[in-house]
Image (cartoon, helix red, strand yellow):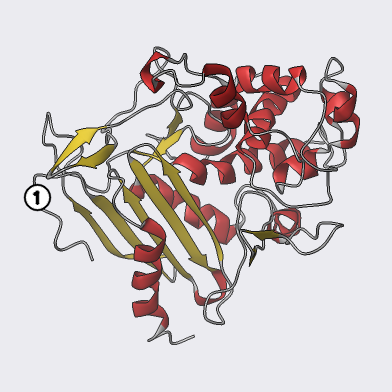
């Protein structure tokens, strides 16, 4: 599935971890069309929504510290938040049942047909401000499930408010540095730089054009982390060994939400979601997984805890299906699983 990637085009980085050991690790293609640097295990990709598992962990660490409660409301954290925030809890934000309006939809209405490169980039603080200008939700909080980037941007601001640290600094101090994820960061243009960086690309006829950022690429809580295969191996080990949180305290993240109005679903398909993780089993195997999709990048992590198997696929080109690629690889290992 990756062998056919030409050496001089954007590509992918792939890792398989089995029984706590890296059994496959390889880069395909180049980080960008200017330097033609080879993708390898140290190349840092924009994770897009894989970031949500780190945002969720940051919130869970604050709960562990006794500084935050899952049933705390938005108006308790932000007293200036409109009255509708009295019914939205931290738990609703974590499991996508808050009903918050979609900030990208609000931006589309605000800017209409303005070219994306002419639209100012929005930050997590900007998303919070948009939510504070609203007066209602899409549905009563807790009643339905709807994937919400707005919710995770707001969670980044919750982390800042409760911890007193910038969101990226909190992630670095409590997660990345703690786990020796030395090149992982929440990227802020003009504030920090991504080492060994892969740039996003989109097919354009027979060529690729660099499409590395958009008006929504500056938010952090929903998708702003960059990392590599090497650092994600540290993250995977921490999850397996409960390095950051005791197993019992991790359970809320691995417990599927049950909306009050009926089963969680998306586009007519059942959804199982905890805090920053999808939880649907795969071919009878327990699974926790997520995908990321943003301009020029496609990513996926598939963890099979009972099989002691993790597959990670990071792509810097928009024409690849990272989810299916990761599952195709998982099939090869699950078929010969000896557990």
Callout 1: few (<14), some (14-19), or many (20+) C-alpha neighbours within 10 Å? Answer: some
Please indicate whether residue 300 sits to the left or right of residue 150 in the image. Answer: left
Residue located beneath label 1 in the image = 7
For residue 282, above or below residue 79? below
Residue 50: x %, y % from top left: 50, 46
Residue 336: x %, y % from top left: 38, 86
Q: How many numbered markers are drawn?
A: 1
Q: Residue at x 52, y 17 (%)?
A: 111
Residue 278 in sight from this viewpoint: yes
Residue 222: x %, y % from top left: 56, 36
Q: Residue at x 85, y 58 (%)?
A: 261
- Of 35 and 141, which appears nearest the observer? 141
For residue 156, above or below residue 257? above
Instruction: Please tell me whether mark 1 sits on a helix, a strand or a loop.
Output: loop
Res 196 → quadrant: top left
Q: Residue at x 36, y 18 (%)?
A: 117
Res 123 → quadrant: top right
Please indicate whether residue 77 sits to the left or right of residue 47 in the image. Answer: right
Residue 260: x %, y % from top left: 87, 57
- Of 91 and 191, which appears nearest the observer? 91
The N terminus lies in which quarter of the figure?
Answer: bottom left
Residue 164 in sight from this viewpoint: no
């Amino acid at each position: 599935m990756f062998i056919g990637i030409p050496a001089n085009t954007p590509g992918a980085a792939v890792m398989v971890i089995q029984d706590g050991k890296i059994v496959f690790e390889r880069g395909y293609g180049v980080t960008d069309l200017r330097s033609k640097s080879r993708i390898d295990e140290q190349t840092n990709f924009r994770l897009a929504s894989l970031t949500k598992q780190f945002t969720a962990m940051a919130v869970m660490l604050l709960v562990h510290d006794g500084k935050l409660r899952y049933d705390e409301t938005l108006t308790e954290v932000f007293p200036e938040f409109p009255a509708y925030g009295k019914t939205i809890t931290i738990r609703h934000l974590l499991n996508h049942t808050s009903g918050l309006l979609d900030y990208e939809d609000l931006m589309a209405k605000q800017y209409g047909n303005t070219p994306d490169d002419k639209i100012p980039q929005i930050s997590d603080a900007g998303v919070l401000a948009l939510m504070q200008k609203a007066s209602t939700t899409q549905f009563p909080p807790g009643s339905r499930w709807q994937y919400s980037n707005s919710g995770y941007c707001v969670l980044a601001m919750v982390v800042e408010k409760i911890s007193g640290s910038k969101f990226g600094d909190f992630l670095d101090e409590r997660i990345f540095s703690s786990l020796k994820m030395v090149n992982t960061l929440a990227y802020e243009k003009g504030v920090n730089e991504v080492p060994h960086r892969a740039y996003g690309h989109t097919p354009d006829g027979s060529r690729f054009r660099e499409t590395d950022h958009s008006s929504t690429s500056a938010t952090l809580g929903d998708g702003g982390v960059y990392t590599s295969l090497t650092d994600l191996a540290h993250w995977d080990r921490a999850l397996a060994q409960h390095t950051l949180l005791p197993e019992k305290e991790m359970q809320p993240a691995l417990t599927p939400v049950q909306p009050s109005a009926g089963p969680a679903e998306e586009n007519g398909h059942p959804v199982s979601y905890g805090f920053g993780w999808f939880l649907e089993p795969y071919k009878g195997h327990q699974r926790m997984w997520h995908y990321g999709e943003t301009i020029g990048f496609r990513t996926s992590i598939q963890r099979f805890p009972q099989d002691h198997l993790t597959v990670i696929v990071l792509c810097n080109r928009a024409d690849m299906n990272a989810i299916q690629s990761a599952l195709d690889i998982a099939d090869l290992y699950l078929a010969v699983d000896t557990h």
